Image: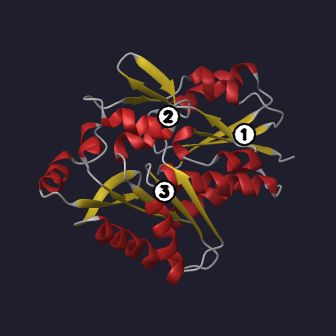
Amino acid sequence: MSKVKIVTDSSCDLNKDIIEKYNIGVVGLNVSFGDETYIDGEMDNKVFYERMANTKDLPKTSCSSPEKFAKSYECEEEEILVITITSKLSATYSTAVLARTMYLEENANKNIAVLDSETGSVGHGLLVVRAAQLAQEGKTLNEIIEEIEKVKNDLVFFGSLETLENAIKGGRINPIAGKIINALNFKVIIQVTDGIVKPVDKARGDNNSIKKVVESVSKKVNEKEGRVLAIGHSDCLEKALKVKEMMLKENSFKDVTISEVGSVMGTYTSKGAILLSIL
């Protein structure tokens, strides 16, 4: 058994088989339609995107309670590493830190560290998996933290969004730049860097937008060998498979995963989004 328990939040958009393989603890964040609140993952993703499309107001997302995070610290391992969504987009990091303080008041034998991933979705997920792999290799908590802090700078994350409307409404992107792009009916190329989502390019039509995001990521691939690729899709699997095929034509990866963008991140990406990250 690993000496270090890896805990994260549900915005990492990891597939269930990966979560089970590495015994990753996942704390579900919250999504609300009016007075109805769901834990991320409770509602089927396809149902979520359909409901969001037919709802006038944007769903509300919120972090979990400190108590739920504290419960995730109840494990056999004496050392725990928590990796959260970027603190620039969510209060989840602060909540996990508060939960750590609460838990250690009664469990002084534990050693718990909380790291800000400074990213989200599939980029966040890649860091969590790397940490879990290091834990399985028998690395200590400090060794894992040192490695994750180092590789965070190597993470590449681009995406193609059908619209910026939800990201603007949710306060996750600059409203002025977003409204100009939306008004021109462009697909949007975003980059997630330094914990912030930034529009970096635009394109007309799915084919052009996919081509541009693939080109943006591919430029970074050849800098290092043995990298892994994560593709996230907002209820558009066929598009994700096409992107995978395009990426593999000119690049090689140690591993490639495709996952669904869940309801927390999907609230802001909207349906039809493709997210690509390499580490």
* 164 relative position to 75: left or right: left
Of residue 264 and residue 112, the one placed in the foreground of this image is 264
Kindly identify which residue carries mark 3. 237
Question: As drawn, is 261 to the left or to the right of 181?
Answer: right
- The mark lying in front, picked from 1 and 3, is 3
Disc 1 vs disc 3: Cβ atoms closer than 8 Å? no
* Horizontal side, residue 109 vs residue 197: left or right: right
Q: CA distance from mark 1 to mark 3?
A: 34 Å
Q: Are marks 1 and 2 in contact (CB under 8 Å)?
A: no
User: What secondary structure is found at the residue carrying circle 2?
Assistant: helix
Three-letter code for the amino acid on which mark 1 is drawn: Ile
Say which residue label 1 marks. 80
Q: Position of residue 218 (x, y in %)?
A: 45, 77
Q: Residue at x 26, y 51 (%)?
A: 163
Indicate whether 129 appears above or below 219.
above
Query: Which secondary structure lies at badge 3?
Result: helix
Looking at marks 1 and 2 on the same chain, the residue that comes earlier in the sequence is marked by: 1
Under tag 1, what secondary structure?
strand
Ranked by sequence position, the earlier of labels 3 and 2 is 2
* Residue 195 seen in this snapshot: yes
The spot of residue 114 in percent (x, y) is 60, 40
Label whose residue precedes the other's in the sequence (1 or 3): 1
Residue underneath mark 2: 92
The residue under the point 60% across, 61% down is: 257
In whole angstroms, how far apart are the C-alphas of marks 1 and 2? Answer: 16 Å
Its colouring scheme is: secondary structure
Query: What type is the residue that disc 3 sits on?
Result: Leu
Given residues 140 and 4, the one toward you in this image is: 4
